[in-house]
Amino acid sequence: MPSPYVTLILTLDEPLLLADDRGGAPVRRYDALVGGLHNTPRHVVHPGRQAGIQFGLTPLGARALLGMPAGELAGLDAHMSDVLGSCVVTVRKQLLVANSWDQRFAVLDGWLLSLLDQDAALTPEVARAWQLLTASASALPVAEIADAVGYSGRHLRARMRAETGLSPKLVGRIARFDRTRRILQRRVTAGGPALLAELAAGCGYADQAHLTRDFRDFVGCPPSMWVAEGP
């Protein structure tokens, strides 16, 4: 589902299969995937379980580890080797022959450190705007964030689109949705009630209708249906 992170997945058994439509036949196969920031769901097809390693990168992480702005990957799903080269094949082979999770994490640590560009950085203004957009449960207005970082609203929108591929308003919506969805998932997985109106208020939505709107936009169904299907 949409989140404020660039997604990296390295499979440990069968390839990752993505379908274009919910419940549709798989149309794309990946042994290792990079998924950019997006505002629509991705549908994974599997027989009930799948093994792999997934991690998420902020825009700063994308610059430091992928060597590019996250905006260049916005809305895209790409083979990781197309982005990072043949090292992906090597590291995946090392992960497959590792005998424990400690060994796998050691492989990943070494690989990520080899990719790291310590000089990569966002401009301070963009970094601060990202922090405000993703940390604010109250969904600060874009104009207020622009004032806080010393940009005009127009310049902030241009810089955020270049860096992330998304508008500031959409980044804020996705970050709030991501927090809300994770809270809801933990709540119902633990056997508790959904309490959607309370959840909406606690996560900064004006009301439950606005929460439902985001679920429809970002998941394709209302939260009640998502819960019923088993998050």
Image (cartoon, rainbow, N blue to C red):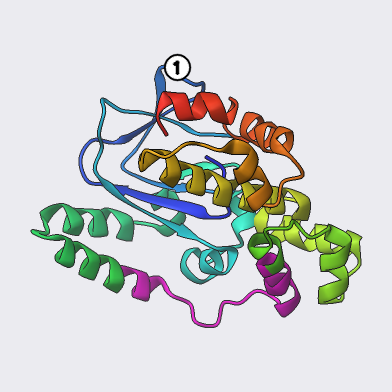
Q: Nearer the viewer, residue 219 or 163?
A: 219
Q: In the image, 202: left or right of 99?
A: right
| Position in image of residue 42 (x %, y %) | 50, 34
| Residue named by callout 1 | 24
Q: In which quarter of the image is residue 112?
A: bottom left
| Position in image of residue 171 (x %, y %) | 69, 53
Query: Is any part of residue 172 visible from this angle?
Result: yes
Residue at figure coordinates x 49%, y 48% from the top left: 182
Q: Does the magenta stretch include residue 115?
A: yes
Q: Does the magenta stretch include residue 62?
A: no
Q: Is mark 1 on a helix, strand or loop?
A: loop
| Position in image of residue 141 (x %, y %) | 83, 58
Residue at figure coordinates x 42%, y 38% from the top left: 188
Q: In the image, 51: left or right of 119?
A: left
Q: In the image, 118: left or right of 210?
A: left
> Disc 1 residue type?
Gly
Q: Main secondary structure of the magenta part?
A: helix
Above or below residue 219? Residue 69 is below
Residue at figure coordinates x 17%, y 61% from the top left: 101
Query: Is any part of residue 3 visible from this angle?
Result: no
Above or below residue 185? Residue 154 is below
Q: Which residues are the magenta region?
A: 111-131
Q: Which residue lies furthest to the left in this view?
A: 99
| Position in image of residue 114 (x %, y %) | 35, 74
